[in-house]
Amino acid sequence: MTLANEGWNGLQSVAHNLGMSVSDLLEKIGRGQMVVLDSEELEDLLDTIDGLEGLLEAKEEESIF
């Protein structure tokens, strides 16, 4: 595997933030135990969660039926 310095540094940073080695991080990704999301996809998922939470709150307040 070949990485540019920026990619390697970013990978090290992610692994460090998760409390694991780069090797462990790559192993988990390769085994499907962790996933990588595009930042826009993550933003869409968070927006969906916010929307669902709003619906649940409205239902609890009996604003919607």
Image: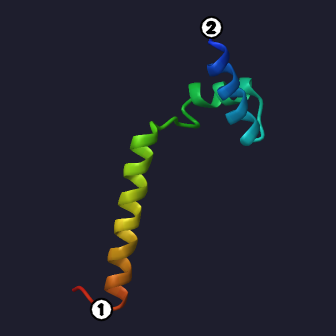
For the point 62% across and 20% down, the residue is 7
Instruction: Rate crowding at label 2 as few (under 14), some (14 to 19) or many (20 or more) other CA atoms within 10 Å.
Output: few
Q: Quadrant of residue 5?
A: top right
User: Based on the displayed image, in which of its 4 quarters is residue 29 positioned?
Assistant: top right
- Which label was assigned to residue 4? none
Residue holding disc 1: 62
Q: Can you give x and y, in whole percent of width and height, for residue 59 in the image?
A: 32, 84
Q: Nearer the viewer, residue 21 or 8?
A: 8
Give the left or right position of residue 51, taking residue 27 as reference.
left
Q: Position of residue 11 (x, y in %)?
A: 66, 27
Disc 1 residue type (three-letter): Glu
Q: Where does the image place residue 51, in percent across and percent down from the top left?
A: 34, 67
Report whether 65 appears left or right of 35.
left
Amino acid marked by disc 2:
Thr
Which of 25 and 3 lies nearest the eye of the viewer?
3
Residue 58 lies, with reference to residue 16, above or below; the image says below
Residue at screen point 38% across, 82% down: 57
20 vs 61, left or right, is right
Q: Secondary structure at mark 1?
A: loop
> Which residue in the protein does label 2 denote?
2
